[in-house]
Image (cartoon, helix red, strand yellow):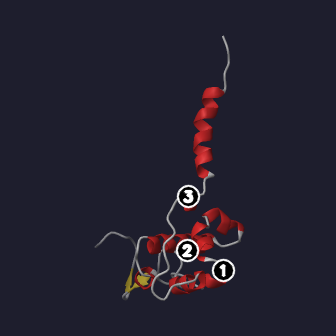
Amino acid sequence: MSFSLGGGFRSVFPAFTRSLQNKALNRPVPAPRGSIGTPEDFLKAIGRSAETKVQYESWEDLWRASGLEMRKAGIPVKDRRYIMWSMEKYRQGQDPSDFAYEAKGKKKIRGWGPAVQNGKRIRSRRHQ
């Protein structure tokens, strides 16, 4: 009887090594179009003050950047996900004025909402 750990490692390492690849290197770099010619122009077009959070020297550097590099640069998760999402939309040929939107504001009321709505006390969620 022999004991082998080979089967266990094979099931763990392929998934782990796949996550270490920079998938941005495999995607095509879109050509600048319209009024967008530099990374700063693109980041200003998508809004949310992205140009103050990310600094890239060239167009190639912006499009070859991965989420892990942005994470190491200290960009918060929401901003990083929005920038990556916007880059993919631009890569697909859409104009930033069509897909860019501002962040949601903070909620005004916490919890389930007020106990009185439209002059009636709300006791349950079922319709009466």
**Three-letter code for the amino acid on which mark 1 is drawn:** Lys
Check disc 3 and report its element: helix, strand or loop. helix
- Identified by mark 3, the residue type is Lys
Locate the C terminus and report the quarter of the image it occupies: bottom left
Q: Which mark is residue 53?
A: 1
Graded by Cα atoms within 10 Å as few (under 14), some (14 to 19) or many (20 or more), the crowding at tag 1 reads some
Structural crowding at the residue carrying mark 2, measured as other residues with C-alpha within 10 Å and reported as few (<14), some (14–19) or many (≥20): many
Mark 1 or mark 3: whose residue is earlier in sequence: 3
| CB atoms of marks 2 and 1 within 8 Å | yes
**123, 113: nearer the viewer:** 113
Q: Confirm whether residue 105 shows in the render.
A: no
x, y percent for residue 54:
65, 78
Q: Which residue is mark 3?
A: 23
Q: Which residue is mark 2?
A: 83
Give me the C-alpha separation between circle 3 and circle 2: 15 Å
Q: Nearer the viewer, residue 4 or 122?
A: 4
